[in-house]
Image (tube, grey):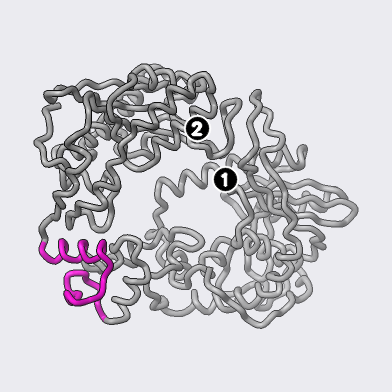
Amino acid sequence: MRDVVPAAVEPPPAVPVGAYNRFTMPSVRLSKSKIVAGLQCHKRLWLQVHRPELVVYSPATERIFAVGHQVGEIAQQLLHPGGTLIESQDNLSQAIRDTEAALAAAGNAVLYEPTFRYAGVLVRVDLLTRREGVVHMVEVKSSTKVKPYHVTDAAIQSWVLKGQGLPVDRVAVAHIDSGWVYPGGGDYQGLLVEEDVTDAVGAQTALVWGWVDELREVVAGDMPAIEVGRQCHDPFDCPLLPFCTADWPEYHVSLLPRGGSEAAALLAAGYDDLRTVPADWSFNAVHERVRRATVSGEPELDVAARQGLLGLAWPRYYLDFETIGFGVPIWAGTQPYRQLPFQWSCHIEREGGSLEHVEFLDVSGEPPLRPCAEALVAALGDRGPIMVYTGFEKARISELAERFSDLAPALQAIIGRLVDLYPVARDHYYHPRMKGSWSLKAVLPTVAPELDYAALDEVQDGLMAQTAYLEAIAPQTGPERRQALRRAMLDYCAYDTLALVRLAHFLAGDAAPAS
């Protein structure tokens, strides 16, 4: 988050309802989320206010929002049950009136999502309690620890509440305990832990007036001229990044893998297009290979990629998992955000080039972990290399071995047979169309363009597979729809392992076998 250090000014006393001054009827109104956006980047705030149609959140971000909403609902029952929910989500003025009425109706109160406005700044508090005139506030987060921007969120809310005359005595952030194990039966006691952040919030509260004044000036002026930089991903991925990069050259220097400082140096020297960078620029070996291939427009494949692949034994297996991590676990014995495999695909190549395909997918909604592990052991046998891409599958198999001690010897033996194609591709192959990425989705179109994920139906990537899985296991999903989702997930995962077959043969210099 950008450091903003205006003069430390305490908020003035609460302003009587109906009074007219710059605090109650400002020309530019803000909210907590807009202030946080403005602290990240002035240009982001300006665009969110003046060009809101440009704000498009990614499916991954939407998933985070959904988990946050789920955690917020659970927090209401876990931390302070029996409170009053301030609804009127679509009518914030009514929500403010409802909050005022709820606070006036009782000396002690527990409110969920009470809404307040002070000096033109609107906030919704996740959970507020008032006991004997003392107010406690809880900000609920779906993360597994308190982060700096959580304190900023709470400081803005506390500032508004104090401006309204509410004596906020304690501020806490409730977050998920990543080590907690779900016992089942809908019992989520222990999922959330509260951390007292009162002192940290107090230190930031005095800064809020400066933020508000500064950001109102930003919104009232012209669009700030701010270049893309680290702030675009800290503390959040900015949903306006496509707008800010729309006029970039196709091969912008930012595509250099793990090359943030290198790209900054190039931009400072006046180079934004990798194709215009002088050949004598001092690059590391990877960046030089990317530059060289980008300039020539031709792929580069080092014959050393063949070493270690041509001599592999038979049969050869090509394995890929699909997993899901629940912020709020649904299966007993599991923990928040652990990546749990619910599906795998495996192509088996015999000597001579014939291919078989085996797969696993359980959409019953029951815990799939043990059936998944048992089916994996049965399918992979006891000999032959198992090709994967990155260490993801190794980590998941290790976790299955820890979970099921009786299957551990067989699963550990499988781990010993894994062959990771990712470092082979990263160290020995590059195509300009990969644009700095060695993800399988970036590599595959340059190796096997006939395998086009866009040609698949509902599931074209891992996030879509997770979304389809959630719908498939939902009780309200009908059998026809469940079967359609299952087919789409199977087709997608099979594409991933067929892609591994194509890639392995390409790196080894062989023609890919017929599927």
Q: Nearer the viewer, residue 429 or 218?
A: 429
Q: In the rendered structure, which amino acid carries the disc numbered 2?
A: Glu
Residue beneath the point at 59% across and 63% down: 31
Q: Is residue 208 above or below residue 447?
A: below
- For residue 461, what is the image quadrant? top left
Whole-percent x and y of residue 503? 20, 40
Q: Which residues are magenta?
A: 270-296
Q: Is residue 2 visible?
A: yes
- Residue 130 falls inside the magenta stretch: no
Residue beneath the point at 59% across and 46% down: 142
What residue is pinned by disc 1? Answer: 68
Q: Is residue 475 visible?
A: no
Q: Is residue 408 above or below residue 262?
A: above
- For residue 441, what is the image quadrant? top left
Q: Is residue 80 left or right of residue 181?
A: right
Mark closer to the chain start, 1 or 2: 1
Question: Which image quarter holds the C terminus?
Answer: top left
Nearer to us: label 1 or label 2: 2
Q: Is residue 20 left or right of residue 233?
A: right
Q: Secondary structure at mark 2?
A: helix
Q: Residue furthest right?
A: 132
Q: Nearer the viewer, residue 316 or 116?
A: 316
Residue beneath the point at 68% across and 67% down: 118
Disc ID at residue 399 = 2
Disc ID at residue 416 = none
Q: In the rendered structure, which amino acid carries the disc numbered 1?
A: Gly
Decide: few, some or many residues near mark 2? Use Cα within 10 Å; few <14, some 14-19, many ≥20. some
Decide: few, some or many residues near mark 1? Use Cα within 10 Å; few <14, some 14-19, many ≥20. some
Whole-percent x and y of residue 80? 77, 42
Whole-percent x and y of residue 451? 18, 37
Q: Nearer the viewer, residue 261 or 452?
A: 261
